[in-house]
Image: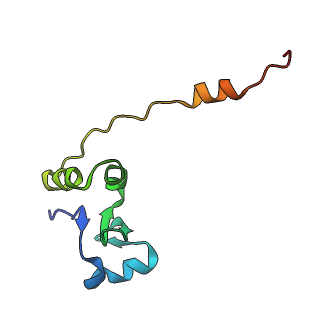
Amino acid sequence: MESKPILITNVSTSYFSVARHYGGATIQGESYVYCPERDILIKRDWLTIYKKLQWEDFVSAVKSGKKPKLQPAPNQNKHKIKSLTQSLFD
C-alpha cells in the first residue's frame, strides 16, 4: 500500500497549481487545503496542527508521520458570559 503525502510544497510550480485557484484539491482520494503563505498543500486532517504549531515543529511532525497531541484551548467563554450579564436589581 502506497502512503499518501501529508504535505506538498512548491504547488505553484507543479502539476497541482490548479489547487491555488480553488483553495485545495483532492489527490489520491485525500482532501488537501492550499495555504498561499507557504505555497503548500496540506492534508485536511493535519490543518489544525499546521495552524497551532510553529513551522519547524510542524515539519518535524510531518517527517515523523505522527500527529502530535495538542493542548485543548481553555474554555474562557463561561467567565465572559457571566461577567457580561447585568443584574436586573442594580
Q: Residue furthest front?
A: 90
Q: Is residue 79 left or right of residue 84?
A: left
**Rendering coords of residue 41 (x, y %):** 31, 68
Q: Quadrant of residue 8?
A: bottom left
In this rendered view, identify the residue nearer to me: 52 or 83.
83
Q: Can you say whether 73 is above or below 4 in the image?
A: above
Identify which residue is drawn at 45% across, 77% down: 22
Q: Quadrant of residue 78?
A: top right
Identify which residue is drawn at 61% across, 29% down: 80
Q: Can you say whether 28 is above or below 84 in the image?
A: below
Q: Is residue 54 left or right of residue 87?
A: left
Q: Can you say whether 69 is above or below 40 in the image?
A: above
Tally of numbered discs: 0
Q: Residue furthest top?
A: 89
**Rendering coords of residue 5 (x, y %):** 21, 64
Q: Quadrant of the C terminus?
A: top right
Q: Quadrant of residue 4?
A: bottom left
Q: Quadrant of the N terminus?
A: bottom left
**Rendering coords of residue 42 (x, y %):** 31, 63
Q: Is residue 11 left or right of residue 22?
A: left
Identify which residue is drawn at 33% across, 82% down: 17
**Rendering coords of residue 24 (x, y %):** 40, 71
Q: How is the image coloured?
A: rainbow
Q: Residue furthest right?
A: 89
